[in-house]
Image: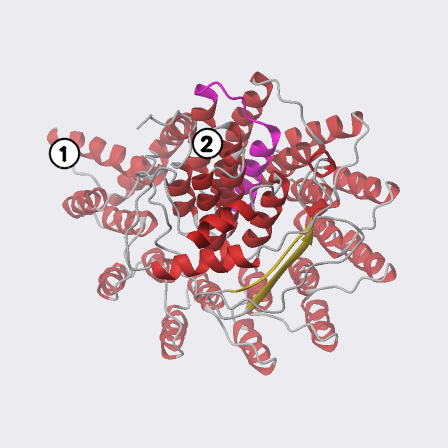
Amino acid sequence: MLLLPAPLPTRFPSYHFLSPVLRDHRILQPPLLATTSAAVTTASGEATQFSKPLNEYGSSGDLNSVPNRRYDFTPLLRFLSNSESDSDSEAEVESPPPTSLDLNEFQLVESYRAVPAPLWHSLIKSLCSDSSSIGTAYSLVTWLERHNLCFSYELLYSILIHALGRSEKLYEAFLLSQRQTLTPLTYNALIGACARNDDLEKALNLMSRMRRDGYPSDFVNYSFIIQSLTRTNKSDSSMLQKIYAEIESDKIELDGQLLNDIIVGFAKSGDVNRAMSFLAMVQGNGLSPKTATLVAVITALGNAGRTVEAEAIFEELKEGGLTPRTRAYNALLKGYVKTGSLKDAESIVSEMERSGFSPDEHTYSLLIDAYANAGRWESARIVLKEMEASGVRPNSYVFSRILASYRDRGKWQKSFQVLREMRNSGVSPDRHFYNVMIDTFGKCNCLDHALATFDRMRMEGVQPDAVTWNTLIDCHCKSGHHNKAEELFEAMQESGCSPCTTTYNIMINSFGEQERWEDVKTLLGKMQSQGLLPNVVTYTTLDAIECLEVMKSVGLKPSSTMYNALINAYAQRVSFYLITYINSLHDHFNSQLLMSMPVT
């Protein structure tokens, strides 16, 4: 829930700037174009030269009304900076326009009274282009407002809010917004600042409040929000559908950028059908999708195993005059690897090289994956050597994929060879590699090797995570070494690594197989007390235990075989109800996210 902070004092307490020593001042000569020019020493001690033509900032309509004069803002910026230094230790409060001024300030006010508004906008934008001079820009805006030297202060404040958002100063942006009544301009600046800083809840709440205040949102805000969802990997099809429903409800005309953002959002959420539908809409309107948009769709199609459609989009990209680059080739290659189409994978890499694009680390990793999945170990190693010869250094992930392919075929002995080749290549094993190695030994019931790998991992300073512990505990449980599994469970907690839902489920099943029903209940209670959400396995276990309690109450003695049978039976029923329940929670969360922000 968003609560806007208290009104802002006259100055930002969080910005401190050195009193500028203005030097290298220049006033541009003809052609006759109004120009702002000043050199300001920032907080870092570097001199920043602001000298930009107005046509970089203002609209053409604004510039037509600007007289062909040159204004020297150096005295004003020096005065504002000195004023900042003098008041750094004083808490100022907002004051009405002054009734009297000292002579210096009076002369400044009179000398700048004729400056057109577009020039002030240009100067403020120039100052805001450097995060270290935003404080000076803020002082300038308050000075102009105090002496009533400019109009459209909401535009000036929106420029400042935009700059603060770009500098990741979201809290200060909200403080500043309290200086003026929120208008469409300042609303848009705040929404953009929130979206850029990936604070989606505030951005959505602001849009709801904006609508409640009678101001329609625009397509730029929706683009910012969808871009943030995509950037943070939070793209969710149901949320995107709700956002699109709002766009339609507000009768907002979709521009090319918003359509591209929607396509990418649906593609990255895994809803490839809707992504394709919007892609058809773009093409039907005579617009050309961006290369990044097509790459996102190709990736989504490849992930879904729909390589024929991915190929068609790839060909459309080339026919549309766009040149596929490494990312596009990798997107299609990933689809071939996923579907096991080794010949197609080899073919697309060859085409990529003929087109003048060198394979990158991701290309080699995917190709190694393809060969490893096909059981062609020697080919995978050849690609690894080519990778090194091309100056592309393999990372730990590449070797972990080779190891995983051996694991899936029960060839645990190859683990030592992979580790040796890895070290010869100068690559140090990371946690993910060690987790795969432990899992390889565990699946092949080589528990001594799994424990030895675990010890080596810690000796090399690689800290185990929950996945490491869960893998070790699970392989011991499945091998019937329940006591060792319990020891590892206790060691996990003593090491400071908190058990997760998966950990508890592994131990609950272990105790169930041992007919330790009371211990199962204890674990369930401990799990719930830690605020961990149950999953299908947990609910299945709860139902099975409840049934066993009924059996005991009528004199029947449950066995581990009966327990396992109950687990399997309840799993079929619980999974349906739990999925339904999770979907309802998901819809409830999205509706909460789009609720209006309460007025303070």
Type of amino acid under label 1: Lys
- Check residue 18 for magenta coloring: no
Residue pointed to by mark 2: 204
Q: Note whether residue 340 is visible.
A: no
Name the secondary structure under disc 1: helix
x and y, in percent, of residue 550 in the image: 17, 29
x and y, in percent, of residue 491 in the image: 24, 65
Depicted 79 relative to depicted 254: above or below: below
Name the secondary structure under disc 2: helix
In the visual, does 410 lie left or right of 445? right
Secondary structure mainly formed by the magenta segment: helix
**Which region of the structure is painted magenta?**
211-234
Dot 2 alpha-carbon crowd within 10 angstroms: few under 14, some 14 to 19, many 20 or more = many
Depicted 268 relative to depicted 550: above or below: below
- Check residue 226 for magenta coloring: yes
Dot 1 alpha-carbon crowd within 10 angstroms: few under 14, some 14 to 19, many 20 or more = few
Mark nearest the camera among 1 and 2 is: 2
Residue 223's tag is none
Q: Note whether residue 397 is visible.
A: yes
Q: Residue visible at 75% across and 54% down?
A: 342
In-front residue for pair 257/418? 257
Number of marks in picture: 2
In-front residue for pair 446/506? 506
Q: Residue visible at 34% across and 42% down?
A: 8
Residue pointed to by mark 1: 552
x and y, in percent, of residue 536 in the image: 36, 37
The answer to which of marks 1 and 2 sits earlier in the sequence is 2
Type of amino acid under label 2: Leu
In the visual, does 187 lie left or right of 496? right
User: Among all residues in the image, which is located at the extreme bottom?
Assistant: 424
